[in-house]
Amino acid sequence: YGVRVPHLRRLAKQIAAEDWQAFLATESTCFEEDMLKSILIPMVRMPATERLAYLRKFVPTIRNWAVCDTLCGKWKMNTTERLLVWDYCLEEIASGEEYRMRFAAVTMMSNYIEDEHIWDILYQVTEHSHEGYYYKMAVAWCLSYCYVMFPYETEEFIFNLEPDVMTMTVQKICDSYRVEPDDKERLKTVKKMLLANRLPRTQSTAGNIRRK
């Protein structure tokens, strides 16, 4: 065990050219087999309804952030598949299970941050909470991407988060090269004020965002 990801991707391509259905039907016995499935499910050409069936079977078995995030990368989806996967994400983010919720948040982040879905994403990832670290970090990661693309829409949601998730989110934003330094400093200042209970959590300073 301990196979590197580039080798797993090469192996997944070999399996995709052969009997990938048989491989996906087998029960995983190690981390690497789960990783291969997380690569194959979005890679192989199949009808949208069939891919959704594989997701429904595989996602509830995820117990590792690496497997989750490999599955959730940017997919090439047609309109029908985008609708099906979006609806499935809405189911999973309400599941109450840490890695199923992380799957939903990271898939939304990777595939749906756009005008059509931004408000739904902001609502879904902040409305559904879980005490697990890996879901909280997924929320922070997702919101940091939302902030880069839609800073005005995102900021008020950030400052209504629980303190630990707010801190994670602001740190993720500050790690981004696509956010202006002045905006990073302003976000850190507001976060500190909120955590010190000197500013109502619903107050936003989004009007001060520096325009690029």
Image (cartoon, grey):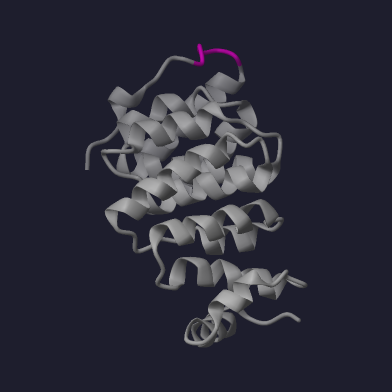
Q: Residue at x 44, y 41 (%)?
A: 87
* The residue stretch that appears in magenta: 197-201
User: Dividing the picture into quarters, in which one does residue 152 lie?
Assistant: top left
Q: Residue at x 68, y 75 (%)?
A: 32
Q: Residue at x 51, y 22 (%)?
A: 160
Left or right, 169 with respect to 31, comes to left
Magenta portion: prevailing SS class? loop
* Tally of marks: 0
Residue 37 visible in rendering: yes
- For the residue pair 183 and 201, the one nearer the viewer reads as 201
In the rendered image of this protein, does residue 138 appear above or below residue 198? Answer: below
97 in the magenta segment: no
In the rendered image of this protein, does residue 142 appear above or below residue 196? Answer: below
Residue 180 visible in rendering: no
In the rendered image of this protein, does residue 109 appear above or below residue 124? Answer: below
* Residue 174: % across, % down: 47, 45
- For the residue pair 1 and 158, the one nearer the viewer reads as 1
* Residue 93: % across, % down: 55, 38
Left or right, 100 with respect to 88, comes to right
* Residue 103: % across, % down: 56, 50
Quarter of the image where the N terminus is located:
bottom right
- For the residue pair 99 and 181, the one nearer the viewer reads as 99
Quarter of the image where the C terminus is located:
top left
* Residue 136: % across, % down: 62, 40
